[in-house]
Image (cartoon, helix red, strand yellow):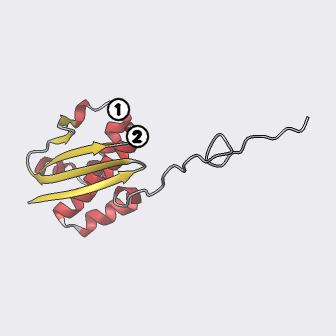
Amino acid sequence: MVTNTSGKKKTAIARATVQDGSGRVRIESEPVELIDPAQARLKMLEPFRVADEDLREEVDVDVTVSGGGFAGQADAVRTAIARGLVEYTNDAELRDAFMSFDRSLLVNDVRQSEPKKWGGPGARARYQKSYR
């Protein structure tokens, strides 16, 4: 069985394919163990820690990710993998475990940075006035 899912965070979009296999997890055709920084790697592998480690030995996960920085990409990959595992196993208990651990494992974070506008240095801040 093959399952395709996606995850988003800020401007990063990750697409994951979960299928029968021997436990390979690849991000952009590269083993997840080679991903730096380590914090991003740990974030990407969170769904396997919440589920049992036996599940990782049963499936192969291939992820492509584009846009954003390393932190946004890590969150997008984590969401895509968690959704893929839930859809692959079709297990309500796993879904509930993910939801009780962290809702963003299964639900995209829709917040986006607000665009800068005229009349100030940022999205909301305005330039100061001086009369002297």
Q: Residue at x 89, y 39 (%)?
A: 131
**Callout 1 environment at 10 Å: few (<14), some (14 to 19), or many (20+)?**
few
Q: Where does the image place residue 117, in percent across and percent down from the top left? A: 61, 48
- Left or right, 76 with respect to 62, comes to right
Instruction: Tell me the CA gap for discs 2 and 1.
Output: 11 Å
Direction bottom: furthest residue: 92
Q: Residues within 10 Å of mark 2 (few under 14, many from 20)?
A: some
For residue 74, which quarter of the picture?
top left
Which residue is labeled 2 in the image? 71
Q: Residue at x 23, y 37 (%)?
A: 32
Classify 60 as above or below 30.
Answer: below
**Secondary structure of residue under mark 2:** helix
Compared across the picture, whether 48 is left or right of 29 comes to right
Residue located 17% across and 37% down the image: 29
Residue contact between numbered discs 2 and 1, judged by CB atoms under 8 Å: no
Residue 128 disc label: none
**Tag 1's secondary structure?**
helix
Q: Amino acid at mark 1?
A: Ala
Please state the horizontal and vertical placement of residue 13, each as a whole percent of the image.
32, 49
Who is closer to the viewer here, 62 or 68?
68
Q: Judge by depth and name the residue closer to the eye, 31 or 132.
A: 132
Q: Is 39 displayed left or right of 52 in the figure?
A: right
Nearer-the-camera pick, 97 or 5: 5
Query: Which three-letter amino acid code belongs to the residue tagged 2?
Result: Ala
Image location of residue 47, percent across then percent down: 29, 51
Q: Is residue 113 above or below residue 33?
A: below
Where, quadrant-wise, is the C terminus in this rendering? top right
Quarter containing the N terminus: bottom left
The residue pinned by badge 1 equals: 38
**In which quadrant of the rendered view does residue 105 lie?**
bottom left
